[in-house]
Image (cartoon, rainbow, N blue to C red):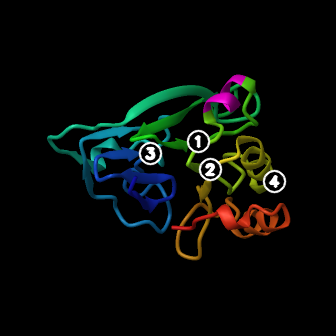
Amino acid sequence: MKIEYLGHACFRLDDKLVVDPYKDGSVPGLLPLRTSATKVICSHGHADHSGVECVKIVDGNCDFEIIEVPSFHDDMNGTLRGPNTIFVITKNGEKLVHLGDLGHFPNDEQLTKISDADYLLIPVGGHFTIDAKMAIRICLAANPKWIIPMHYRTVSSGYPELATVDEFLKLAKEKDIGNKIKIY
């Protein structure tokens, strides 16, 4: 599976599927998103995850199996920030999990669905989502082969309220899972 990072929490898979495109101007420092795919999916309706108009839909077969796992954008059953959809995406025996703007530790049913993925795309910046400590707990419980952090602040982009990826990387090294992390 080809995984292309487009910024913030947006990824394009095999040039066919775009997950969580951001709207123009919704994420400080990111250039306008212009890409194409045969299908677009969004974890929730916030502007930094729902810019479907920034993706040109092209003809073709989107040959991914996509399972939607309902979750919440906060740890108060969605009362603060609403619902969130976790996507479990499979193709040719490979399993990728995109957690969207997950705001809580997954319940047993959710954890079963996201466990043992080849790739776990996980928010680590905190404030609007889980923070680095919770992300590590989820990584340890879900046991993915590869971990791809997302939804954090960089030197040139991201919300000022978000943490950088540094704390997550430090904790991953301490928990001996740092060798599983890929940064795009």
The disc at residue 20 is 3
Q: Are marks 2 and 1 in contact (CB under 8 Å)?
A: yes
Kindly identify which residue carries mark 4. 133
As drawn, 141 above or below 153: above
Q: Quadrant of residue 81?
A: top right
Type of amino acid under label 2: Ile
- Mark before the other along the chain sequence, 2 or 3: 3
Kindly identify which residue carries mark 2. 122
Type of amino acid under label 1: Leu
In the image, farthest residue toward the left: 59
Kindly identify which residue carries mark 1. 99
Cα distance between the residues tagged 1 and 4: 16 Å
Q: Which residues are magenta?
A: 109-113
Type of amino acid under label 3: Asp
- Mark before the other along the chain sequence, 1 or 4: 1
Cα distance between the residues tagged 2 and 3: 13 Å
